[in-house]
Image: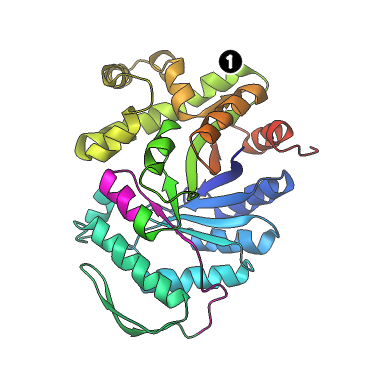
Amino acid sequence: MPRLGLRLHGGLDPRRCVELAAAAEANGYASVWFAENPFERGIMPAAAACAAATRRLEIGIGVWNPYLRHPAQIAMEIGALDELAQGRAALGIGSGIAAPIKRLGIDNSRPLGALADTFHIVRGLLRGESVTYKGSVFAVEDAKLSYRPSRPDFPLLMAARGPKALALCGRIADGLMVSNMCPPGFATHAATSLRAGTRIVQYAPCIAMADRDQAFAAIKPVLAGMLRTFWALGQKVPAAKTSLIDRSGIPEADFAATIVRLQTGVSPEAAIDQRFVEAFSVTGTGEDCLRRIAAYDATGVTDLVLTFAGPDPMADMAYLARFSLGAAT
């Protein structure tokens, strides 16, 4: 089975993040990952607090964007977080979410160049080197951290979807981060661009409870919001549309029809059929969830990081752990 983790994000109060991370550790989860988006809370305070409040959990950043944090700042902060976590930090870097970044007046028209530059600079700084580098987007001159990073071989993961980004990931990254709303089969496709044994961290929403019908009803409004967002993105970014539709088993016409139903006021419960629940979430009873987790495992996902989207995420987390992790809860 993939290692199971908990996804947190800047929409949550940092104190709530600490509560959820502590519960994840108590229930045997392997990691907690923090998604950061523009105009939400910055995730460094919550990540640091969770690192201090736990002893075993991997503390993952998924992801930091170099258009919001200069590569040197990324190295400074992840090095400090890894020190605090005593070697438990992990870092994903991505250059997506273009529209909100453009509202900041930032030219983010060269995302692949930005990633290549960032990986070069961050790696060098975390190795303790003095880095002079002029890339297509970022540059540093005689830059060096004033402290010795705890892990000179710190692994760097990349968020990627399109063929060029996946190819770049295969050349320069130590792992791949896969967004929500990519079906399990996306990992099989992505792996063709990656080195054998590359770590693949996949996000997915989850509602796990003994009442299957209640779980399915609760996940559909969550998927409706995500589907609207990713469908709109896919109209502008071909790779986003491809990753959403291909390997889902759902024809594009059915995606479009579902979006129309949602836009015309049909409830998510009526508009979204079971195919979407199966393709884009881990939902249902413990046995149902185990089958979905196994589907990700079969495609090469090494770490399945779940957003517990139900009304009681701690209860869902503990319930799923009894089936998948053997936690005595």
Residue 268, x across and y down, in percent: 41, 20
Left or right: 141 as drawn, with respect to 302: left
Residue 307, x across and y down, in percent: 53, 39
> Is 176 located above or below residue 296 in the figure?
below
Q: Residue at x 53, y 51 (%)?
A: 33
> Is 239 located above or below residue 33 in the figure?
above
Amino acid type, residue under disc 1 in the picture? Asp
**The magenta stretch spans residue 211:** no
Query: Residue beneath label 1, please?
Result: 213
Give neighbour class at mark 1: few <14, some 14-19, many 20+ (Cα, 10 Å): few
Q: Residue furthest top?
A: 270
- Judged from the image, the secondary structure of the residue bearing numbered disc 1 is helix
> What range is drawn magenta here?
147-169
Quadrant of the frame with the N terminus: top right
Q: Residue at x 43, y 53 (%)?
A: 36
Residue 6, x across and y down, in percent: 58, 45
Residue 96 can be seen, yes or no: no
**The magenta stretch spans residue 154:** yes
Residue 188 can be seen, yes or no: yes
> Is 69 located above or below residue 299 in the figure?
below
> Is 184 located above or below residue 194 in the figure?
above
Quadrant of the frame with the C terminus: top right
Q: Residue furthest front?
A: 196
Q: Residue at x 71, y 38 (%)?
A: 325
Q: Of residues 78 and 186, which is closer to you in this image?
A: 186
Residue 85, x across and y down, in percent: 62, 66
